Amino acid sequence: MTEKLLDLSGVKKTYYTDEIETPVLHGISFYINKGEFVAIMGPSGSGKSTLLHILGFLDRQTGGTYSFDGKTIEDLTDDQVAGVRNSKMGFVFQSFNLLPRHTVLENVKLPLMYSSVPESEWEKRAMDAIKLVQLDHRANFETTKLSGGEKQRVAIARALVNKPTIIFADEPTGNLDSDSGRIIMDTLQELNEVHGHTVILVTHETYTADYASRIIRLRDGRVETDSKVSRRHKRGDKFIK
């Protein structure tokens, strides 16, 4: 039996600067079940990043309702929102956002400092996540000595360390070459298919969206199409950028 994880109804977002109103999202409605791999696509300015920030509790909508795992953001205090975000959500961004002059292990441990996980378990938790992305041989390397693809795999391990329900990936291959991009997408697909993580991929590129089993297309802040698709990429396939 499928179970809803995210549920949006009429979600709107307007930014206010002085007396200027800039509407970005115009009544977004859809739901995502646990275990899905969904790509959110659209041209620049379509509202993809704004929607991601709302889905990931990084921002609040200005209209409509959004519930995550049965709770709406309006029902939670700021501390509770931060707790849900840290314990149930993992984030992977195009720019990696790693700490320079720190090791892979230290970077992956970082989210645990804001969790309820006992410090005695941090190293094992972090190493388990690092092994999952096949970087245990780099655990004690400073991140500045890694390739772009390796840095993104560190970012994925960091996103996994608190064992989240969902992973948000925002243009995760944007700064990578084709081979590194394939490895990242294969990793996300494995996390979805083998380990059961829900994955939401935000992208404007078809070749990354081909890894998803459902594609939601945005245009001008509205859902243009929402359709189930047959995955065109399988793990290990050639990745053409």
Image (cartoon, helix red, strand yellow):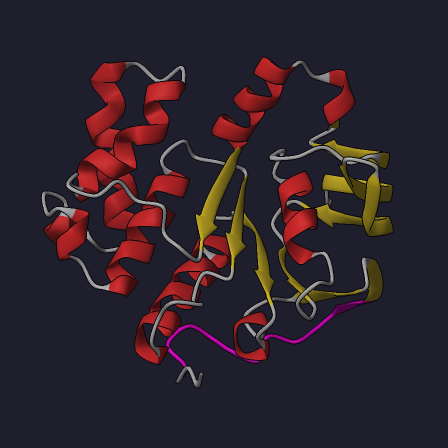
Q: Position of residue 199 (x, y in %)?
A: 56, 52
Q: Total of numbered circles in the picture?
A: 0
Q: Height in image: 205 above or below 163?
A: below
What is the quadrant of residue 175 in the picture? bottom left
Asked if residue 233 is among those painted magenta in the image, a careful observer would answer yes
Q: Position of residue 44 (x, y in %)?
A: 66, 67
* Residue name at image x 68 percent, y 71 percent: 43
Q: Quadrant of the N terminus?
A: top right
For the magenta stretch, what is the residue range?
Answer: 225-237
- Residue 13 falls left or right of residue 156: right
Q: Position of residue 72 (x, y in %)?
A: 76, 26
- Residue 232 falls left or right of residue 190: right
Q: Position of residue 234 (x, y in %)?
A: 47, 75
* Residue name at image x 69 percent, y 31 percent: 69
- Which of 61 and 225 lies nearest the eye of the viewer? 61
* Residue name at image x 30 percent, y 44 percent: 98
